[in-house]
Image (spheres, rainbow, N blue to C red):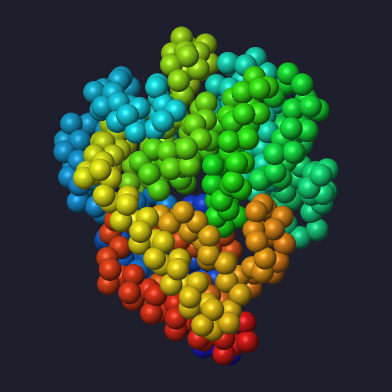
Amino acid sequence: MWDWKEYPQSRAMYEDAKSVFAMGVGSQVQSFGRPHPLYMTRGRGSRLYDVDGNEFIDYLLNYGPLILGHCPQVVNVAIREQLEKGTAFGEPHPLQVEVAKLLVEAVPCFEVVNFNNTGSEAVQAVLRLARAVTGRTKFIKFEGHYHGWMDNVFFSFHPDKGEDFGTRENPQPVIHGYSKGVARNVLDNVAVLPWNNLDYVKNAFRNHPDEIAAILTEPIMSNCGIIMPRPGYLEGLRRLATENGAMLIFDETITGLRGALGGAQEFLGVIPDITCGFKALGGGFPIFAYGASREIMQVVSNRQAVHAGTFNGNAIGCAAAKAVLTELKKDNCAIIRRINETGTHMMREIERMAKKYNLTVRIQGPGSVFCVSFHEGEIWDMRDAFGQEKEAYFVFRQLLLDHGIHIFPTEKGLWYLSAAHTDADIEKTLSTVDKVFGIMKGMGL
């Protein structure tokens, strides 16, 4: 049995926090760390430091936004300068227009954009937009896709033991029992389908003629590890949406700015009607974007579909976004290319090491973000991803943590790369993975 490392200061802080702070952490996913959450004091570049004085090479990156790493100088300088001018004005300001122009230039489906502060808000904005444009109310949501914590999308994304999802051919939408307070009537306006099979989408349009406003999808499924679309699948969604008068919406919360400046729609070559997301846009500051063609966005421009929010497009978020976009654009997006190449190299090496120790490991993703999971067989949808026990992942994660490598706390297993990760970081990480795989082999996993 492995002698697990102790994190006494984090443990004590967690126990104290629970007495005054709901869950003891700010978001539920943070509470899943074993044996308890770790409390961090600072980050710099590719490194994180906890209250016990431990140093980690960080591949969680605040769940993805830190594409330039922790405390990037270009963002810090921009924020300091803006702090001297003001944070939010209750009025428009020039930075909003500058960032909007950069986004319109970068993202294929953008002609007009607007801003939110979180991905959950941005999803609500695009669903309202699609309904306003089409005059319809229903939308297609796919099993396993996470589109935020609002009631009308918070279902059928992470199954719990004993929940009945029906079959792939006859799926059953599920409001998960682990979150009380979600009203059952949120299912009235949605068709929940397995992903990566066009026949199910065709059937949904046949069963709900002239009712479906939108197909809402991640272009790369990122809540069940990383699952790539089957060849032709996104193209098929594009065709079916057009044929049936519905909007194709890409939720690029995770894929935006990763893989390409224009997100997955750029490097996969399928252009949606509407896009929301871009978690990495602020480099760690809260700013999200959504947008579409000028024609589609006209209902927002004409104030026929309300879009509101006190902090939308605030000066701090926009200053950070301008700095991030400007940095990523340099040298024909050299930073993004390097991140992709680094991630692809890590994927190949981790796979090679797993074979060396005869461990069943799957590595999937486009490079800039990828997942390491302990599955047998191919993974194409939620049912594949959650159909097996994953205790091996938690052992893997804890062993890496005890050796100074910080990754995703749950079995999603995502690894995010940043501009701050050096060749030395990657070499040390891969050496540590090799050591951890050796330990796991000795444990009989």
The quadrant where residue 40 appears: bottom left
Q: Is residue 338 above or below residue 146?
A: below
Whether 168 is drawn above or below 346: the answer is above
List x then y, in percent, for residue 132. Answer: 59, 16
Image quarter in which the N terminus is found: bottom right
* Quarter of the figure with the C terminus: bottom right
Q: Residue furthest front?
A: 232
User: How far from the left and from the top, in percent, is residue 61?
Assistant: 39, 57
Viewer-side residue, 168 vs 150: 168
User: Going 52% across and 52% down the picture, which residue do you hit?
Assistant: 27
Q: Nearer the viewer, residue 440 or 79?
A: 440
Q: Position of residue 208 (x, y in %)?
A: 78, 25
Q: Is residue 375 left or right of residue 129?
A: right
Residue shown at the point (54%, 79%) measured from the top left: 355
Toward the viewer: 353 or 137? 353
At 52% from the left edge and 86% from the top edge, which residue is drawn? 439
**Any part of residue 132 in sight:** yes
Figure check: 320 above or below 17: above
* 402 up-or-down from 189: above or below: below
Could you tell me if residue 151 is visible in this image? no
Query: What x and y, as percent, mark residue 168?
Result: 78, 47
Taking depth in this image into account, of 325 and 237 the one nearest to the observer is 237
